[in-house]
């Protein structure tokens, strides 16, 4: 029993070491690329902070989605996204009337992470997608000048719904 436990601990430590090495290799590759592109120190710092944030968060980035069937994929996407998507009245109605279509919509939505003060879209820009917020706080400026009044949005909200009706 003791030998088995020590063996399991050794295997776990080897896996952790391999994950840390893979993370360090990704960081090194990105830093080398930025260095070769003569990117400013300030921008490199911001990019590396964002890379560290993404690498520290658990995600399905290493998950090979092709390992599961299309039906199970749809169920997975629904279980991950329906709590957010059902907050929108049109999507909730779609779920009630056409559950299979709603499942396809869940698979279509993609997750994006934005840096602090990074614009999602700007006034006058053609919207080609609906955006839904799920986590964090977001500033909404109703106008084209940064001096215009800013409203803070947090939690689940949506904007740019007309983008879902635009043919790209």
Image (tube, rainbow, N blue to C red):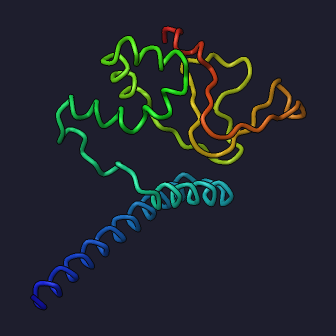
* Residue sitting nearer the eye, 96 or 9: 96
In this picture, is 144 found above or below 168? below
Specify whether 88 is left or right of 78.
right
Instruction: Specify the farthest residue to the bottom.
Output: 2
The quadrant the N terminus occupies is bottom left
- Where, by quadrant of the figure, is residue 96 drawn? top left
In this picture, is 32 found above or below 76? below
Q: Which residue sits at x=21%, y=29%?
A: 71
Question: In x, y percent, where is residue 144?
Answer: 82, 24
- Looking at the image, how many numbered discs can be counted on the residues? 0
* Residue sitting nearer the eye, 90 or 23: 90
Specify whether 53 is left or right of 118.
left
In this picture, is 157 found above or below 15? above
Question: In x, y percent, where is residue 6?
Answer: 17, 87
* Residue sitting nearer the eye, 3 or 63: 3
- Where, by quadrant of the figure, is residue 69 drawn? top left
In this picture, is 53 found above or below 16? above
Question: In x, y percent, where is residue 104?
Answer: 34, 22
Specify whether 40 is left or right of 20.
right
Specify whether 17 is left or right of 27.
left
């Amino acid at each position: 029993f003791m030998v088995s436990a020590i063996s399991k601990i050794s295997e776990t430590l080897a896996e952790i070491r391999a994950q840390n090495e893979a993370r360090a290799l990704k960081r090194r590759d990105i830093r080398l690329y930025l260095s070769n592109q003569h990117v400013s120190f300030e921008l490199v710092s911001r990019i590396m902070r964002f890379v560290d944030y993404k690498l520290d968060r658990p995600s399905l980035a290493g998950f090979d989605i092709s390992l599961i069937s299309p039906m199970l994929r749809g169920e997975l996407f629904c279980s991950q996204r329906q709590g957010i998507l059902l907050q929108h009245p049109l999507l909730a109605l779609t779920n009630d009337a056409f559950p299979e279509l709603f499942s396809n919509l869940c698979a279509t939505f993609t997750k994006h992470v934005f840096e602090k003060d990074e614009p999602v879209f700007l006034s006058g820009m053609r919207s080609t997608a609906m955006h839904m917020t799920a986590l964090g706080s977001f500033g909404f400026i109703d106008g084209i000048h940064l001096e215009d009044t800013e409203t803070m949005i947090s939690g689940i909200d949506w904007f740019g719904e007309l983008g879902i009706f635009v043919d790209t």
